Amino acid sequence: MPHAVRICVSASRRERVRRMMRRLELEDEAHAGRIVDQNDESAQAVMRRHFHIDVRDINEYDVGFNTDRMGVDQCVEKIVAMVRSPQFEETEQSRDKLRDVA
């Protein structure tokens, strides 16, 4: 879709394990790591099956954010600015393409 912004929001595995431990109130880092790995594998499978993309390929995205280094609020500000930019405006052609896919 020409008007769709393809965004990768990521964090290091270490940070994602830490967040998972906090979210699930886990003390076992290895267990949290297995959950993170399982989530990654599931997300990759869904994106491959439905959209035919490799989520690890940075070329699939218009922009990427690492939440180890940038807070969520900052990421949202940048994303909103991109979505509102002229290059991602919805056009009649992009609406037609979306209708063709549906």
Image (cartoon, grey):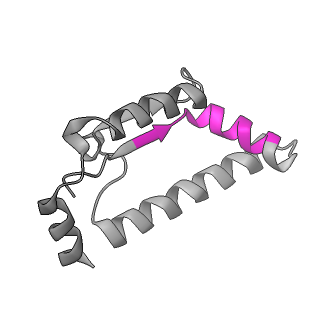
Give the residues drawn in magenta, as a range.
8-22
Q: Determine the image quadrant of residue 13.
A: top right
What quarter of the picture does the C terminus occupy? bottom left
- Above or below 29: residue 42: below
For the residue pair 72 and 90, the one nearer the viewer reads as: 90
Query: What is the x, y in percent for residue 5?
Result: 31, 46
Q: Determine the image quadrant of residue 95.
A: bottom left
For the residue pair 23 and 88, the one nearer the viewer reads as: 88
Outermost residue, left direction?
93
Task: Name the residue: 19% across, 39% down.
Answer: 87
Overall secondary structure of the magenta stretch? helix
- Above or below 89: residue 100: below
Left/right of residue 27 with respect to residue 1 in the rendered view? right
Task: Name the residue: 31% across, 66% down.
Answer: 51
Task: Name the residue: 81% across, 40% down.
Answer: 22
Q: Is residue 87 magenta?
A: no
Query: What is the x, y in percent for residue 80?
Result: 43, 36
Q: Is residue 19 magenta?
A: yes
What quarter of the picture does the N terminus occupy? bottom left
Query: What is the x, y in percent for residue 16?
Result: 64, 39
Left/right of residue 3 with respect to residue 93 in the rendered view? right
For the residue pair 29 and 43, the one nearer the viewer reads as: 43
